[in-house]
Amino acid sequence: MRIIKKNISGVTLIEILIGIIITTIIMGAMYTTYSVVNKTYSQVSEKAGISESSRDLVSMLMRDIRMAGFKYYVGSQTKQEYAQDTLDQCPPGGLLLPSLSYFGFNNGYDNADDSHNPIVIRKKTIGDSDKVSISDTCCDSIEIVYEDFNINDKLQPFIKYKILYFAEKAGTDKGYAVFKTVKQWSQKKAASACSWPLPETGSWETVIDKEMIREYVEDMEFIPFDENGLIVKDTSGDYPDPGKSGRKDSSGNDIRDRLMDIRGVDIRITFRSKENFFDRVRTDRRKPKQLLSGRVETDSEDKPGDEDEPKDTGTELKLRDSVLVTVNTRNIGGDLFK
């Protein structure tokens, strides 16, 4: 006996095709939304990374610049403690600490490497020497000197640091990297001596050599100014450098004599993203940038008419962010530094 079933539900081929089309549209919309959200997240992460690294570097510079020229003053209690610790070696009253360090001051006129000047800024200098970069505008370097104290070091309780910040090429597509070198003035007394070394003795010794602080830097600029807010520079626009003689300021004085007139430093550092940030080259990013010192920075290799052409490896697709701060020096000036 054959049973005929009626009203059996089913899906036709047309309905299946319509379902596939609708599903494809939904998946495409979801993928587009994901791509937009993912790109936005990547851009936010790039901005956050630039902001974080810039704060770290600028904070280090601000701290050291504020310390420039600092001299440690030894109080009476510290003198008593140190004398008490050296009674056996230096009877009857122990070795007396001076109120200020016994270090001499070398202006660096004969040899700039021996300089004890609180702040020395060199324009367009690549590396930790006085090599001047001619091909581009990056970057300035800064040299900072200040003192500290360690009562536990019986041979040399006074400490003097020289901090150098400078830039070098960081490799392909990494721009420049900022490095930090730390030197310490070595002028120890003899272990059995009951007197301090002569001021003329001593030398700089490197304790941290060329430590990389930050990559992907486009430019680093320092500008010294005096108590009147005027830039401390010679007639050619260069800043005081103890190793360069014969340069005069607008009043005809040796510009090196104004190293102690620095009362603050303007800092401008430009960072860029690691990855491409923009899809298309923006025409407004191709305009030359005027820096704080007045020099013009150009970083585009584009030609007129190709502003809308995407670049695979060009730096125009990178995000750039500049940090500008003014740091006042707290410890430069007065008879102690002359």
Image (cartoon, rainbow, N blue to C red):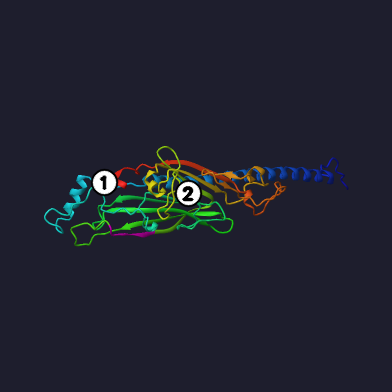
Q: Residues within 10 Å of mark 1 (few under 14, many from 20)?
A: some
Q: Residue furthest front?
A: 252
**With 284 as the anchor, is 222 left or right in this view?**
left
| Residue 31 visible to the viewer | yes
Is label 2 in a helix, a strand or a loop? loop
Q: Give the extent of the magenta segment.
A: 200-207
The quadrant in which residue 231 appears is top left
Mark 1, mark 2: which one is toward the viewer? 2
Residue in the foreground of this view, choosing between 13 and 29: 29
Q: Is residue 39 left or right of residue 142?
A: right
* Residue position for label 1: 73
Q: Is residue 29 above or below residue 131?
A: above
**Residue 49 in view here:** no
Residue at the image position 20 percent from the left and 45 percent from the top: 76
**Which residue was labeled with disc 2?**
238
**Who comes first in sequence, dot 1 or dot 2?**
1
User: Horizontal placement of 53 versus 104: left or right?
Assistant: right
